[in-house]
Amino acid sequence: MSRHDPEQAGARSGHGTLIIIGGHEAKKGQRKILKAVAQRVKGGRLVIATVASHRPEGYFESYQEGFDGLGVGELAELYVENRSEAMQEEKLRVLEEATGVFFSGGDQLRITSQIGDTPLEARIKEIHESGGVIAGTSAGASVMCETMLVKGTSEESYRIGNLQMAPGLGLIRGVIIDQHFAERGRMGRLLGAVAQNPRVLGIGIDEDTAIVVQGSHFAVIGSGAVYVADGSGITHSNVAEARADDLISLYDVRLHVLSDGDSFDLEGRRPVSADALKDAVPGD
Amino acid sequence: MSRHDPEQAGARSGHGTLIIIGGHEAKKGQRKILKAVAQRVKGGRLVIATVASHRPEGYFESYQEGFDGLGVGELAELYVENRSEAMQEEKLRVLEEATGVFFSGGDQLRITSQIGDTPLEARIKEIHESGGVIAGTSAGASVMCETMLVKGTSEESYRIGNLQMAPGLGLIRGVIIDQHFAERGRMGRLLGAVAQNPRVLGIGIDEDTAIVVQGSHFAVIGSGAVYVADGSGITHSNVAEARADDLISLYDVRLHVLSDGDSFDLEGRRPVSADALKDAVPGD
């Protein structure tokens, strides 16, 4: 019952699924988010990409425990110390039969600077295009965007010069993602990012919460909320005129607060009813 | 150039000025907020009401320093240990010639439970009605509303059962105020309050930031931002059906981020240009 033709939907993100997580997803108990990832790996190989971390020790093991018993066929780790390693045939082989990739947390710039424009990145996009699942938590969530948030102060209203952005992996277009959202008081910086170009929809994801993106829709799962800041109706913004240490002034942002079971139409920029989504996002 | 007749404006708040502060206003340097209070005391007596505090020691002295040199005629302290003290003639005399009252921080329930419905409260409203200034910071800001926020978790998205509200002093109607706003990540709880009854405009004020309310307009001063959450266009809310530990789901909140120099029309629920406000809010 999707209102959009598949071409359009495909234009937003690949034909597979993105699971974009606000950090600290539960690795014990119900594990709703890891379960959603595992389902979409369909018994195949899931690669845990710990590239974002400067010290990846322990990450892979914690996901081995987290995914235990959830039906993933095989778990493998992908880490690259530096960019030349990212060019090695051996690294690419880790991704060969993979039906899923999971980016753990750390520094989003490590992901893009080490694997951006390498065969690894191309292969990851291929997995997504061909129907696989690409998941990412924390830094691994931010990196999904075309333009990603790198740095910005939390627990503070947005000052014009306060934000660092960089080109991301571009697995999803037209949105900017922020994570650890309510927990770190990041509304200010998300609005700052949206103000810079309201073309981009701002999506703030709480911890242990994820959006499951398929085509041009996403569904919310997990224990927190997802904030969608839509700047298309902004009637006033001082971003261009103000000095770097001036505070933002922004009128008429449309804000949605979504929680588990809610879903969103990225093309129409509207929350949609759970019924309408059932046809678009199978499973879970 | 106000679009509203004075009767209407008067219906929102008294004929004086309210200065509602998000906490931690600067007491050294430029002191923009304290200066705005002092100007409106017009050389008369300013009463520092430390009622919100269980241990008021030091509060009055810090404001003596803060207001030093700003042209306030006389500073006096109003503290009541308990409600029977609030009935004493001697306490009322502190307010007798006052042209301004400043509520310091602490616990908003201490203010309302100790002085609510006493001659002290009546006198404070009289000062406001007759053109004086009532200022309040932190707890002293929250208490201005008809229904005030008392407690709610910060740095968390809003869960339905998470909020404690109580009747406030009612110096300003139709709004709900939250303070230490960006600093404590309180968007979640403000949206929660607005969702309960979108009639109420949510106003979140950062530290060292204030709204100066006169009639049905306010102007923003200080170093932080003011967030206005307008729920009048909300198309979906789960507040009534969900269980106490469920997360909020809320579509189509209109959000404005205002900073120093911006102003807002409370009747029209619109930000207004600085020019339009000049006639409505003199000074500063």
Image: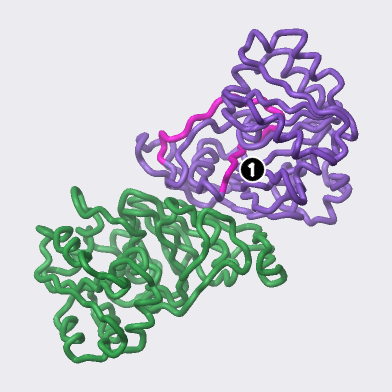
Chain colours: A green, B purple
Instruction: Answer with left or right where residue B211 lies relative to residue B253.
Output: right
Residue B98, image x, y percentages: 84, 24
Q: Is residue B176 magenta?
A: yes
**Mark 1 surroundings within 10 Å by alpha-carbon count, few (fewer than 14), some (14 through 19), many (20 or more):** some
Q: Is residue A192 magenta?
A: no
Residue B270, image x, y percentages: 71, 50
Q: Is residue B12 visible?
A: no
Q: Quadrant of the N terminus of chain A?
A: bottom left
Circle count: 1
Q: Quadrant of residue A199?
A: bottom right
User: In this orientation, which residue lies closer to the viewer: B238 or B51?
Assistant: B51
Residue B277, image x, y percentages: 83, 50
Subunit bearing disc 1: B
Magenta stretch: helix, strand or loop mostly? loop
Residue A82, image x, y percentages: 30, 84
Q: Is residue B202 visible?
A: yes
* Residue B127 against residue B70 in the figure, above or below: above
Element carrying mark 1: loop
> What residue appears at the point 25 percent right and 53 percent down from the top-left corner?
A26
Instruction: Answer with left or right where residue B225 lies relative to residue B13.
Output: left
> What residue appears at the point 16 percent right and 86 percent down from the top-left corner?
A93
> What residue appears at the point 39 percent right and 54 percent down from the top-left corner?
A206
Q: Amino acid at mark 1?
A: His
Residue, disc 1: B24
Q: Which residues are magenta?
A: B159-181
Instruction: Answer with left or right where residue A245 lies relative to residue A10.
Output: right
